[in-house]
Amino acid sequence: MVRESSPTHDIMRAVQVLRSGGLVAFPTETVYGLGADAENGTAIKRIFTTKGRPTTHPLIIHVGSLDELSTWVEKVPAAARALAEHFWPGPLSLVLQRSRRVPLAVTGGLETVAVRVPAHPVALALLRAFGGAIAAPSANHFGCVSPTTACHVQSDLGDAVDLVLDGGLCNVGVESTIVDATSEELCILRPGGVAREDLEHALGRAIPEKQTKASVRVPGSHRSHYAPRAQVILVDPSRLIDEAHRLTSCGYQVGILLPHDIAPDSVAARKILQAPESLTDYAQMLYQFLREFDRSGCNRVIASLPSEEGVGVAIADRLRRAAEPRGTIKTFKLPQTLEELCKS
Ligand code: TXA
Ligand code: MG
């Protein structure tokens, strides 16, 4: 059931659903989350089965304010506090040592937990009325494109969710940046809505580049992810038009995610969607675009990577993962410590 907007009675209904162990999909500024009471083991199990996600793949917990952080984590190193103060509410998840209140079912057995305060009025109203932590992965099937509207959630998960709160189109459009902040030596585990440059600016120091590589293994951070049904093919922009002709002449239903600086009338395809010039706008539209290619019956999508600055790093990361063959989905052996995570 989709509920439009966020009048108080819908929030109260959502709180009742959470308290009785149900699942509530809710908007955040990044993507829609599939929420459950973080302290209810049965509800957490339901998240994994509903998404078809391995239980070793840890969930992010969402809280209503920075003041609540100390309830859910053991200690908050100075760098973590500085980032939380600067970016929360916002698209930044901090990985910290979990407190006893966070069940291992949430963390996939890890002694750490990812926490964030989302910057969406509906999410904040829900969290404040609920009072506890809400564990929420993106509200889509495992490995598929994340939802940025309530309709996406409804069409992906349907009646498997007890309530969907509709907060319109998500502003940021790609998931939060995840930072291992368990020590003063920070490590970006997933690029997202907060750019590395902005993290560094807030900290007043660099986060070592070598630790931000996509090769860093995060449990559940599979190479193939965020993928539409159509096969995504990444090409250099100079080869895009030729490649579209070649695939069309082979009989494929071709979609093109056209860079902002190539004229759309220079190419023929089943569906052409043009990337906005602003990387912020592009991030907001990326998942909508991938879904639209599927809806239009495309079975191949040709795209080029945007410039990898700011949120362009997250867009490029999602496009690369979307382009990985599905066969590369692997379950990584869980590293024991975050130090191992960053080194691996
Ligand atoms: O923007 C977002 O982060 C959205 C919204 C709903 O908040 N959530 C989201 O959750 O993207 P999900 O489950 O799709 O992705 C969570 C990622 C996973 O890749 C997981 O590996 C990582 O967070 N993660 C969670 N806890 C972790 C931990 N303790 N250590 C390392 N990585 C962790
Ligand atoms: Mg996800």
Image: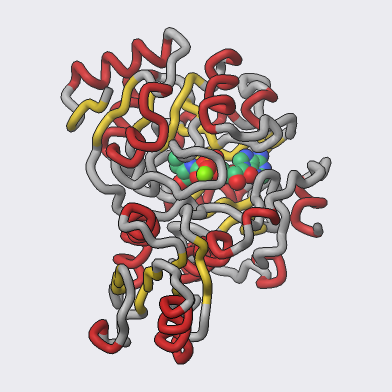
Question: 68 left or right of 264?
Answer: right
Residue at 45% of width from left, 49% of height from top?
145
Figure check: 53 above or below 7: below
Figure check: 341 above or below 17: below
Q: Position of residue 108 (x, y in %)?
A: 69, 31
Figure label count: 0
Q: Is residue 222 visible?
A: yes
Q: Position of residue 167 (x, y in %)?
A: 24, 38
Figure check: 133 above or below 277: above
Figure check: 164 above or below 167: above
Q: Position of residue 312 (x, y in %)?
A: 45, 71
**How does the figure colour the protein chain or chains?**
secondary structure
Q: Is residue 284 visible?
A: no
Quadrant housing residue 59: top right
In the rendered view of the protein, which quadrant contains the C terminus? bottom right
Question: 64 left or right of 316?
Answer: left
> Which of the two residues, 55 or 76, is positioned nearer the viewer here?
55
Q: Position of residue 313 (x, y in %)?
A: 51, 69
